[in-house]
Image (tube, grey):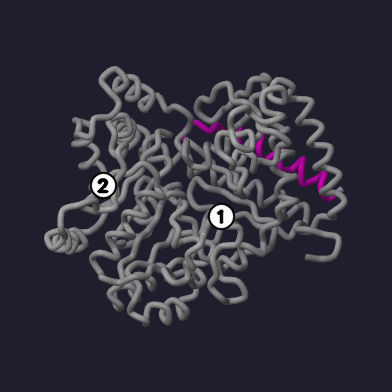
C-alpha cells in the first residue's frame, strides 16, 4: 500500500466519505435506530447472531419484507438485493414454488425422523442433478462437511485432511488453518481453540501443485477438501488444469477429494463440478439448496459407499458422530424438492449468467475509467470487485488484497443508494428475479461512489 493510500484511494478521502455516508444512513433509518441502534434487548452484543454487526452500517436496519430480488426495511427504504442472504437466498427471496411447498408441509407436520414422498423425490433429483449415487441430508454445509470428513477418515484410516489457504468450509475446525509467512497456524482470531489444528490438517496454497504433491506424499491425508474457486475473501479462480491435477494427485496417493459447492453453485444447475467435469469422491452443497430453509446435502461415490459399509460392519452399535435430530426434516425436504424441481432450472441460470456477465462488464468499465488498480472477477452468477490488481493466485494474495476501510465505505455508500451487497467481502449475486434495471442501478451507484472516491 502506497503511504496515505489504500487500493489507490487517498485515506483521507475514504474517511471523509465514510463519515458522510454514516450520517446519511442514520438520517434515513430513524425507526431502525430506535429498534437496533442501541442493541436489541436479550441478545449478546445486541444482535441474534454476532455477524449481524459486521455490516458497514452504524447499526443494522430492521427488515420488513423481501421478495424476489427486492428488500424493504421498516423505515420505508427499498433495496435491490445483491447479497441475497450471502447465497442462502441465491434464487431470490421466497420463490413461489418454495413458499407453496412450505405452506403445504406446515399443515402436515414439520419433522418426524421418517421419510416422506418428498424424500423419495429428492433422492432421485440429487442423483440426476449432481451425478453421485449416494446422498445424505444435513442442516448446514458445516454439518455436511464435518460428516463427510468423518467418513473420509473412517474409510481411509488416515488422520489428516488438507485444506487450501484462504478456504471457506463453514465452521469446520480443521479448516481454520492459515499460512502465515509460509508456516501453518491456527487462524488468527479463532475463539476458544485449545487444540493445535496443524496436528489435524495440512494447508497449502491454492494453485500450488508442487506444494500439494509434497503434502500428499506423507500418506497421512484422508481427504483434500476444496472449493472449486476460493470465494470467501477476495475471489481466486483456479488456474487452467489445476483442479484436474488435484484429482490426479489425490487418486495417485489414495486420498479422497471433497468438492464444497456451497458458494460455487452459482456456476450452473450442477454447480462448478458438472460445468467443468470434476470427479469428486465426496460433494457438499448447503445454503441455497432448500430456497432459504436451513438444509444441506452431501453425496459420495459407490466406492466410498462400499468402503463405508465395510467399516460400519466392523463397528459396534453406537452413535456414529453423524447426523442431528432435525437433519432431513420434512419441511426442509419439501422446500428442497421445490427448489430442485422448479427453481434451480437451466432457464433460471441462463438469466442469472447473462445479467451477471453484464454486471461484471459494467463494473470493470467503471474501474478502468477511474484508473483504479482494481479488478472484477466472476463465477457464474457470483460477481466480485477486488480493490487490488488481479488476477489473484492464492489465499495469501487474496488476504493482502483485502482493503477493509475502503470496502466498508463502498458498501455503505452503495447501500445508501439502494443497493445491498454482501457485508463480508465485495460479493454480489444475481438471482432469477433480478431485473436489468436493478443491474443498471447498481452499475450507476458504483460509478457514483468511485467517482466520489477519486475526486
Q: Is residue 48 left or right of residue 175?
A: right
* Residue 437 locus on image (x, y percent): 61, 31
Task: Please tell me which of labels 2 and 1 falls first in the chain.
Answer: 2
The circle on residue 138 is none
The boundaries of the magenta stretch are 432-454
Q: Nearer the viewer, residue 207 or 108?
A: 108
Q: Residue at x 20, y 42 (%)?
A: 124
Q: Main secondary structure of the magenta part?
A: helix
Which quadrant would residue 32 be assigned to in this image? top right
Which quadrant would residue 429 be assigned to in this image? top right
Q: Is residue 438 left or right of residue 197?
A: right
Q: Nearer the viewer, residue 93 or 102?
A: 102
Q: State the SS at label 1.
A: loop
Position of 342 relative to 130 (above/below): above
Q: Residue at x 42, y 48 (%)?
A: 265
* Residue 386 locus on image (x, y percent): 65, 55
Which mark is in front, 2 or 1?
A: 1
Q: State the SS at label 2.
A: strand
Which quadrant would residue 150 be assigned to in this image? bottom left
* Residue 379 locus on image (x, y percent): 50, 53
Q: CA distance from mark 2 to mark 1?
A: 30 Å
Q: Is residue 409 left or right of residue 392?
A: right
The residue under label 1 is 191
Position of 223 relative to 70 (above/below): below
Question: Quarter holding the N terminus?
Answer: bottom right
Position of 62 relative to 250 (above/below): above
The residue under label 2 is 136
Q: Residue at x 66, y 38 (%)?
A: 442
Q: Is residue 356 left or right of residue 225?
A: right
Residue 305 among magenta residues: no
Mark 2 surroundings: few (<14), some (14-19) or many (≥20) residues within 10 A: some
Q: Residue at x 72, y 39 (%)?
A: 412
Amino acid at each position: 500500500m502506497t503511504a496515505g493510500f489504500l487500493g489507490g484511494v487517498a485515506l483521507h478521502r475514504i474517511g471523509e466519505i465514510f463519515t458522510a455516508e454514516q450520517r446519511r444512513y442514520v438520517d434515513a433509518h430513524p425507526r431502525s435506530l430506535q429498534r437496533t441502534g442501541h442493541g436489541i434487548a436479550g441478545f449478546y452484543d445486541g444482535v441474534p447472531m454476532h455477524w449481524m454487526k459486521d455490516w458497514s452500517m452504524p447499526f443494522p436496519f430492521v427488515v420488513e419484507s423481501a421478495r424476489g430480488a427486492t428488500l424493504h426495511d421498516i423505515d420505508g427504504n427499498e433495496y435491490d438485493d445483491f447479497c441475497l442472504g450471502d447465497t442462502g437466498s441465491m434464487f431470490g427471496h421466497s420463490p413461489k414454488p418454495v413458499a407453496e411447498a412450505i405452506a403445504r408441509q406446515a399443515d402436515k407436520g414439520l419433522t418426524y425422523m421418517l421419510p416422506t414422498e418428498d424424500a423419495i423425490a429428492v433422492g432421485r433429483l440429487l442423483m440426476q442433478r449432481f451425478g453421485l449415487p449416494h446422498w445424505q441430508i444435513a442442516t448446514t454445509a458445516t454439518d455436511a462437511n464435518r460428516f463427510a470428513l468423518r467418513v473420509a477418515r473412517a474409510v481411509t484410516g488416515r488422520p489428516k485432511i488438507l485444506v487450501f489457504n484462504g478456504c471457506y468450509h463453514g465452521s469446520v475446525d480443521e479448516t481454520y488453518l492459515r499460512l502465515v509467512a509460509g508456516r501453518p497456524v491456527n487462524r488468527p482470531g479463532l475463539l476458544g481453540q485449545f487444540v493445535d489444528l496443524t496436528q489435524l490438517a495440512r494447508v497449502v496454497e491454492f494453485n500450488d501443485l508442487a506444494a500439494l504433491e509434497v503434502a500428499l506424499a506423507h500418506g497421512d491425508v484422508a481427504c483434500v477438501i476444496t472449493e472449486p474457486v476460493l470465494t470467501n475473501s477476495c475471489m481466486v479462480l483456479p488456474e487452467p488444469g489445476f483442479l484436474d491435477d488435484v484429482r490426479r494427485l489425490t487418486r495417485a496417493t489414495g486420498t479422497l477429494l471433497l468438492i464444497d459447492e456451497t458458494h460455487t453453485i452459482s456456476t450452473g444447475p450442477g454447480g462448478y463440478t458438472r460445468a467443468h467435469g470434476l470427479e469428486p469422491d465426496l460433494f457438499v452443497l448447503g445454503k441455497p439448496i432448500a430456497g432459504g430453509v436451513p438444509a444441506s446435502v452431501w453425496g459420495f461415490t459407490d466406492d466410498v459407499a462400499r468402503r463405508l459399509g465395510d467399516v460400519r460392519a466392523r463397528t459396534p452399535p453406537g452413535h456414529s458422530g453423524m447426523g442431528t435430530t432435525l437433519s432431513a426434516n420434512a419441511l426442509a425436504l419439501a422446500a428442497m424438492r421445490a427448489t430442485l424441481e422448479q427453481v434451480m432450472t437451466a432457464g433460471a441460470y441462463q438469466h442469472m449468467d447473462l445479467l451477471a456477465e453484464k454486471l461484471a462488464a459494467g463494473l470493470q468499465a467503471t474501474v478502468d475509467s477511474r484508473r483504479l488498480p482494481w479488478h472484477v472477477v466472476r463465477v457464474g452468477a457470483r460477481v466480485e470487485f477486488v480493490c487490488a490488481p488481479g488476477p489473484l493466485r492464492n489465499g495469501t494474495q487474496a488476504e493482502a488484497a483485502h482493503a477493509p476501510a475502503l470496502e466498508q465505505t463502498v458498501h455503505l455508500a452503495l447501500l445508501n443508494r439502494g443497493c445491498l451487497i454482501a457485508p463480508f467481502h465485495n460479493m454480489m449475486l444475481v438471482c432469477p428475479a433480478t431485473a436489468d434495471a436493478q443491474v443498471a442501478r447498481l452499475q450507476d451507484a458504483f460509478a457514483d461512489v468511485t467517482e466520489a472516491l477519486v475526486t
